[in-house]
Amino acid sequence: GAGGGAGAAGARGALGERLGGAGPGAPGGGASLYSADVETAELVGELVGAFDPGGAGAESLRVGAGTWEVFYAPHIRSLSRWLFGTEFAPLRYRLWKDDGGVYRLTSHARYHGPILGDGWLSASGTIRVGEQDSELLLHLDQFWVDGPGESPRAELPGGGGSAQDQSVSALGRLGFVPPLARFPVRYLDPDLSVFRFPPLRSDIAIRRVAA
């Protein structure tokens, strides 16, 4: 209703203020999934509660071309505690449509901690609408690791890269579980989106940082 729409608009505005300026160099105080607080969770919940997800899968592909960064993901934050304080930030996704009309996605997560060290974990694959028109299905088929430079390789080179790259990809494909790669869309606007990670009943909120 009108009240729900007004509430969602207020929550969206408040989140925009918390996230600060756009762009990878200006993440804002609330943009890191490690600085997300109770208020961030409440605002994300308000957006989700007022959103009708019907058809949001196709719409998210239509408007989603660009680079996005995670600012809220409780399950990833919890994972850090299990991995001896290793943090995963920034965590970014890039979505585009290739020349064949297939939607493709790459993800890059910087990890840093006292045990695992510092570097980047990356993956790429395809993304499409699932059986429900409000969900997305992700299929990852390439995986790679880079050192602690300022940025990872955008994609693997043709042929699958080095022998090490090919070994990492093979391990990644063995560990990829398709049922865990189903993401219902819980909220969507041109610059912010929320997805569900069903196995842990946890939301992932992302915001656009580049076109």
Image (cartoon, rainbow, N blue to C red):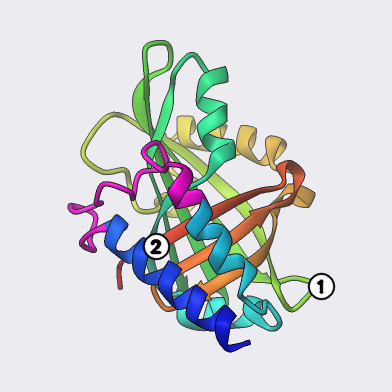
* Vertical side of 99 occupied by 176: above or below: above
Label at residue 131 = 1
Name the element at disc 2. strand
40 part of magenta stretch: yes
Task: Please provide the residue range marked out in magenta.
Answer: 20-41
Badge nearest the viewer, 1 or 2: 2
Q: Which residue is located at x 76 percent, y 44 percent?
A: 199
Upstream in sequence: badge 1 or badge 2? 1
Q: Specify whether 181 is left or right of 18.
A: right
Q: Which residue is located at x 49 percent, y 81 percent?
A: 6
Badge 1, how many Cα within 10 Å: few under 14, some, many 20+?
few
Q: Position of residue 86 (x, y in %)?
A: 43, 22
Q: Position of residue 36 (x, y in %)?
A: 41, 43
Give the residue at mark 2. 207
* Vertical side of 120 occupied by 9: above or below: below
Name the element at disc 1. loop
Q: Specify whether 199 is left or right of 191.
A: right
Q: Amino acid at mark 2?
A: Arg
Q: Position of residue 108 (x, y in %)?
A: 41, 46
Q: Is residue 28 visible?
A: yes
Instruction: Write down the quadrant of residue 56 in the picture.
Output: bottom right
* Vertical side of 168 occupied by 125: above or below: below
